[in-house]
Image (cartoon, helix red, strand yellow):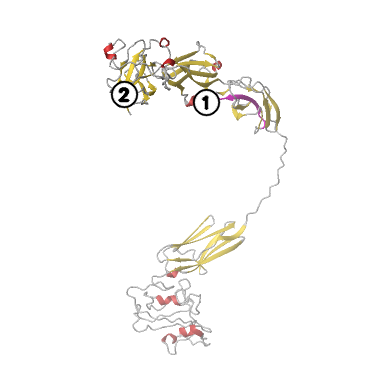
Amino acid sequence: MEKTASEAPACGPEETASEAAKVPATEPPGEVAASESPGEEQTSKPQEPASLAPAAPSAPAAPTATQPEPTSEDIPSAPLLLTLEDVSHSSVTVSWEPPERLGRLGLQGYVLELCREGASEWVPVNARPMMVTQQTVRNLALGDKFFLRVAAVSSAGAGPPATLDQPVHIQESIEAPKIRVPRHLRQTYIRQVGEAVNLQIPFQGKPKPQASWTHNGHALDSQRVSVLTGDQDSILFIRSAQRSDSGRYELTVQLEGLEAKAAIDILVIEKPGAPSSIRLLDVWGCNAALEWTPPTDTGNTELLGYTVQKADKKTGQWFTVLERFHSTTCTVSDLIVGNSYSFRVFSENLCGLSTSAAVTKELAHIQKADIAAKPKGFTERDFSEAPSFTQPLADHTSTPGYSTQLFCSVRASPKPKIIWMKNNMEIQGDPRYRTLSDQGICTLEIRKPSPFDSGVYTCKAVNVLGEASVDCRLEVKGAAGLRGQVPQAQNPTPRVPKTAVSIATADGPAPGAYWPPPPGAGVQNSGEPKHLLPGSASPEALDYPQDGRAGGGSRHLSPQGTRFRPHGCRLRPCRTHRCRELAPVQRPPPPGHPSLQSLPRPTARPRRLGGASGAAGR
C-alpha cells in the first residue's frame, strides 16, 4: 500500500450534515484501539466488541456512531491496527493494516476522518478514498485536540471504521535538556581574592527549560551572586570574589520531568602568611643552621615551599639562598669569614610569596679560624740547559728561481748562538742567504736558488753549556731534470775539456804552468800565456769557455796551486771550495816548455797519483 499526506479540512464541527453524510458514520466494530502515553505516539491493539468500548460520557464530547445494519459480503470489514505514528507541533501521522475481509466487489480505498474535541461531526480528511495505509495530516494549530478514525470503502459502501480511543493533542515537540560544560571548567576554577568570577554555561532543551543554581547544596546569596538565564545558556557572575565563595556550584536544568545537572568547583585563594617563628640553631665554620614553623594561614591552598634569604650586616642587602624549599629546616653554607649574617624566610603558594617574612633575632657570626701559616723554603731552580734541537731540519727539494726556507727549532738556556753552514762552510755573511731566529725557531731563507745551491746545510747552536747541530740535504733541480746539470745557453759555445793538475816541488819556488788553448776554443784573452803561481789568493786561469761562460776553467784549480782538495762534489762544480774531485796529478810540464825556461828544475821528482782519478787527469 502507498502512503500519502493530506491537508486538514477547513471545516469545523459546525459543518452541515450533508458533508458528513458523504461517508457513513458507524461505530467501531468489535475492537477498540489502545492509546499510548500522553503527548507521544499512540499504539493500537486489537479491537474488542462494542459492548467493551468505553462509555461515551467518559470521553469529553466524544461523537457517537450508529450501529450499522448487518453487513453483507460486499462490504469490507474494519481496518486493523490503527496506530498513531508521529505527532509534531503542526502535523500528525497515523497508519493501519488492511481489513480481514475486503468484500466481493473489491476495495476502492480508505477514508480518514477527523472529529475535533467538543464537536459531533466527523470530517473526512480526503475527499475520496485513497489506496494508502499511512497518512499525514498537516497544517494543524498548536493546542488542537481531535479524534481520528479510518474506514475501508468498496463500491457497495463503507465498512465499519477503526477509531483511536484517545484524542490527539498537537503541542510543541520536547527535546531532553543537556548541559555542555566548557573544557576549562571541568577542573577546579581558581581565582584570586578580589577578582571577578564570570561563568557562562550553555545548555540545550526544547521548549525552554528551567535553570537553577546552588552553592554547596544551598541557594545562592543574591547579594553577592548574580544569575542570568537565557534560552541557551546560564551565566553566574560574582563581582569581587572572596574566600567564602569557594566551593561547588551546581546547575540544574529541568523540562517536564526531565532534568540535567552539572557541577563546577571554584577555589578563591590569596597570598599565604609568614612562617610563625624562626631561630638560629647552630653556626660552625662557614655554615649556619635554621629552623622555622609553617604559617597558620596558607592562603586557602597548598604551599609550594619556602624562600630563604641572607643579608650581610655591613651591606644590609638580601640575597636568595633557597627557593621553594619544602622542609622547615635548612643549612646555609659558603658564608664569608669575618662577616655577620641575618636570615629571613617567606612562604609561597600559587599567588606568590607572602607579604611579610620571619626574620632571625640573633646574628650568625662567622669567626676566623686560628691558622698559622708556615712558609716553605723556596728553592731556586736552575733553568740552564745545553742546546738541543726539538725539531730537526728536513731534506728539501726546490725549484730554481723560487726562494726556499729551511726550518728547525732549538731549546737552550742561556740563548744560544745560531750558525748556518753549507757543506761545513759558514754562510753567515753571504747576501744570498737570510737567517732568522725567534723564540727558538731558526729559519734559513735561500733567495732564488740555482742548482749550484744544492748540498748539505747545517744549523749549529752554541752556548756556554755545549753545542748541538742538525743538517739536511737540499736539492735544487735543474731545467733538464738531471741532478747537478747546468742549463745550457741557447747558443752554447763548444765545450772544451779541462785538465786539473797539481804540481809539487821539493824546495824552491813553485814552477809556473802554461796550457796553450786548443784549436777552435775561442779564447777571449789572447796574447801572452797565463801562468799559475803558487800561493796566489786569486789564481788566474785560462779563459777557456766552460759551460757557456768565459773563464770557467779557473774554478777547478786550488787557490794554493799545489794540491787539490777533494770534498765529495762528484762531477759537478763546487762553488764553495772551487775544486772538482779529481785525482791530483803531480806532473811537471814537458821538457823545453817555455814556462820552465826561467825556473830551476826541481830536486825531487813529483809523485804521480794512480787510479781512475789519475787516468782522468792524464
Front residue of 96/393: it is 96
Front residue of 121/211: it is 121
Considering only vertical position in the picture, is 507 above or below 368?
Answer: below
Main SS of the magenta segment? Answer: strand
Which quadrant holds residue 383?
bottom right
Mark pair 2, 1: CA separation: 75 Å
Instruction: Give the residue displayed 62% in from the left and 25% down from the top.
Output: 345
The image quadrant where one finds the C terminus is: bottom left
Q: Which residues are magenta?
A: 337-350
The image quadrant where one finds the N terminus is: top left
Front residue of 359/211: it is 211
Residue 179: x and y, percent?
46, 22
- Residue 187, numbered label: 1
Which quadrant holds residue 465?
bottom right
Q: Which residue is mark 2?
A: 74
Residue 564: x and y, percent?
49, 78
Q: Secondary structure at mark 1?
A: loop
**Three-letter code, disc 2:** Asp
Front residue of 252/450: it is 252
Which quadrant holds residue 279?
top right
Q: Earlier in the sequence, mark 2 or mark 1?
A: 2
Instruction: Give the residue displayed 63% in from the left and 29% down from the top.
Output: 326
The reply, left or right, for residue 201 in relation to residue 355 is: left
Residue 511: x and y, percent?
47, 83
Residues marked 2 and 1 touching at CB (< 8 Å):
no
Which numbered disc, 2 or 1, marks the residue closer to the eye? 2
**Three-letter code, disc 1:** Gln
- Residue 91 visible in the picture: no
Residue 102: x and y, percent?
33, 26
